[in-house]
Image: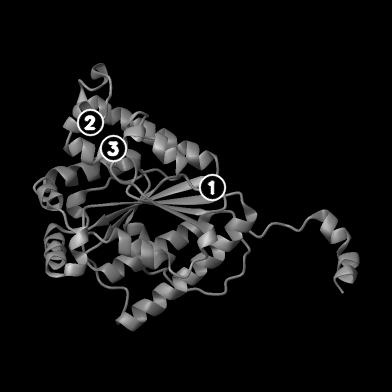
């Protein structure tokens, strides 16, 4: 890629490979830290570093948009209060909105439940030339549905013969997800997944902070407390999910999330790394334009 760098920050010593899983190594949730040494010296230093990375991301997105051959999809998965919304907001603040498509997946509608679980996903995939961001995604089908398998039989309207063996259901879904991400990659859209790894204690403190702040009450539901009771089951589901679906063309980044500022820097740096790995460059000028450059200048004059 020959697009000239106008803004940059050296992230070579940030050890991003420590958090990346591409199918060549096994991910262990018990060995995944929720917090690491900060990459910033102060809040001012954090803002400067994040700003430099985001500016470079914006530059590359302009090139990718103009070339219109590649796309990048960022998938964010995490427990409640891990910081998905804030991370996405900071990552995209200052980026040309024409180059970005963001979608937040909620509880499936009746129409969506009448189709396979990937139906609503396919409609929201980013176009070539754009950065797509999913706040939650099709991975809910092997996370929350695995922790609550009654969703399969009582809610998802699947034929009974397909839900008798729930273990087989999730093995099949892993296959489907792997194939879907390979299909996306083979059509120019690389899929990169982020697991924002917040610790149970840090989540507890953030939920209490929501209770203490009236402006955050809209974010709080009793369901958040109910799901905390299933923490070990969710951690097992995340571990199995990451190990089953990590691939070179669709890697996972398991980002320590107890320090929000550090988390945002790591996510931004990983996003920049993935953009820089794509073979993108400014498209060549049309031959007819080049041949008639002088006459066009004359007409404009």
Q: Residue at the spot x=11%, y=61% of the render?
A: 204
- In this figure, which colouring scheme has been used for the structure? one colour
The mark that comes first in sequence, 2 or 3, is: 3
Furthest residue to the left? 229
Place of residue 257 in the rendered image (x, y in percent of width and height, measured from the top left): 25, 62
Of residues 147 and 256, the one drawn nearer to the viewer in this rendering: 147
Q: Which mark is residue 141?
A: 3
The quarter holding residue 82 reads bottom left
Q: How many marks?
A: 3
Q: Residue at the spot x=53%, y=50% of the render?
A: 71
Give yes or no for contact between labels 1 and 3 (Cβ–Cβ under 8 Å): no
Q: Is mark 3 on a helix, strand or loop?
A: helix
On screen, residue 118 versus residue 213, left or right, reads right
Residue 69 in view: yes
Residue 15 in view: no
The quarter of the rendered structure image containing the C terminus is: bottom right
Q: Residue 127 carries which label?
A: 1
Q: Residue 155 carries which label?
A: 2
Mark 2 vs mark 3, foreground winner is 2
Place of residue 143 in the rendered image (x, y in percent of width and height, measured from the top left): 24, 41
Place of residue 54 in the rendered image (x, y in percent of width and height, measured from the top left): 46, 69
* Crowd rating for badge 2 (residues with CA inside 10 Å; few <14, some 14–19, many 20+): few
Distance from disc 2 to disc 3, alpha carbons, whole Å, reads: 12 Å
Q: Which mark is residue 104?
A: none
Distance from disc 1 to disc 3, alpha carbons, whole Å, reads: 24 Å
- In the rendered view, tell whether residue 233 sits above or below residue 88: above
Give yes or no for contact between labels 2 and 3 (Cβ–Cβ under 8 Å): no
């Amino acid at each position: 890629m020959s697009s000239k760098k106008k803004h940059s920050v050296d992230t070579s010593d940030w050890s991003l490979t420590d958090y990346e899983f591409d199918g060549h190594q096994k991910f262990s949730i018990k060995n995944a830290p929720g917090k690491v040494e900060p990459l910033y010296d102060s809040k001012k230093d954090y803002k400067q570093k994040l700003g430099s990375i985001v500016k470079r991301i914006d530059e590359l997105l302009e090139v990718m948009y103009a070339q219109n051959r590649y796309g990048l999809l960022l998938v964010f998965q995490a427990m409640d209060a891990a910081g998905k919304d804030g991370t996405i907001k900071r990552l995209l603040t200052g980026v040309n909105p024409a180059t970005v498509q963001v979608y937040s997946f909620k509880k499936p509608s009746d129409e969506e439940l009448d189709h396979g679980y990937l139906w609503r996903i396919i409609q929201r995939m980013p176009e070539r030339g754009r950065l797509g961001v999913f706040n939650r995604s099709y991975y809910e089908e092997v996370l929350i549905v695995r922790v609550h398998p009654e969703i399969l039989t009582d809610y998802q309207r699947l034929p009974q013969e397909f839900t008798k063996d729930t273990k087989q259901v999730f093995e099949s879904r892993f296959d489907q997800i792997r194939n879907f991400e390979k299909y996306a990659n083979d059509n120019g859209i690389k899929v990169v997944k982020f697991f924002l790894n917040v610790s149970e204690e840090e989540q507890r403190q953030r939920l209490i902070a929501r209770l203490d702040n009236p402006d955050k009450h809209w974010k709080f539901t009793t369901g958040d407390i109910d799901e905390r009771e299933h923490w070990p089951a969710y951690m097992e589901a995340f571990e199995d999910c990451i190990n089953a679906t990590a691939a070179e063309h669709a890697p996972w980044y398991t980002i320590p999330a107890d320090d929000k500022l550090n988390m945002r820097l790591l996510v931004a740096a990983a996003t920049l790394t993935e953009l820089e790995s794509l073979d993108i460059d400014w498209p060549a000028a049309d031959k007819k334009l080049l041949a008639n450059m002088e006459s066009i200048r004359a007409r404009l004059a």
